[in-house]
Amino acid sequence: MSERYWKLNKDLQPVRCTIKEWGNQRVGYENNIVDQTAVGDFWISTVFLGLDHNFSGSGLPHLWETLVVKDGNYTDAELERCGGDWWDATLMHLKMGKKVRDSQ
């Protein structure tokens, strides 16, 4: 198994897996969507990536991503990633929603 590939178990906890298991998980990608929210002209989406995006070599693996786009313009998108579990990703999504609402 690789340190890089992760899947969600039945309790929505990330667990290490093989590249094949990771690929099979991507087939049902909608199951990896934590939340999606429209706030005015902004779209906020938080998903489970299943690939560790923490390239620093220290800390938790960054397996969750929240993306904010305005009017479908990905050029100026805001991006945040975190480690932890589904609930940490949900909290990240809620905080980003508050940040967007407070900025309007």
Image (cartoon, rainbow, N blue to C red):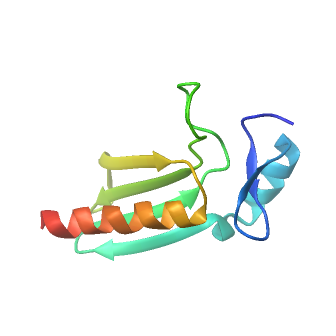
Which quarter of the image is occupied by the N terminus?
Answer: top right
Q: Residue at x 28, y 66 (%)?
A: 42
Position of residue 13 in the picture relative to residue 63 (left or right): right
Q: Residue at x 24, y 62 (%)?
A: 99
Q: Is residue 90 above or below residue 84?
A: below
Q: Quadrant of residue 31?
A: bottom right
Position of residue 74 in the picture relative to residue 53 (left or right): left
Q: Residue at x 55, y 67 (%)?
A: 87
Q: Is residue 74 above or below residue 44?
A: above
Which quarter of the image is occupied by the C terminus?
Answer: bottom left
Position of residue 85 in the picture relative to residue 21 (left or right): left
Count of picture labels: 0
How far across and how far down the image is residue 40, in percent? 22, 74
Judged from this view, the residue extending furthest toward the top is 57
Q: Quadrant of residue 30?
A: bottom right
How far across and how far down the image is residue 91, in percent? 44, 65
Position of residue 62 in the picture relative to residue 75 (left or right): right
Q: Is residue 18 above or below residue 11?
A: above
Judged from this view, the residue extending furthest toward the front is 59
How far across and how far down the image is residue 63, in percent? 60, 48
How far across and how far down the image is residue 65, in percent? 49, 52
Q: Nearer the viewer, residue 104 or 99?
A: 99
Q: Residue at x 55, y 60 (%)?
A: 47
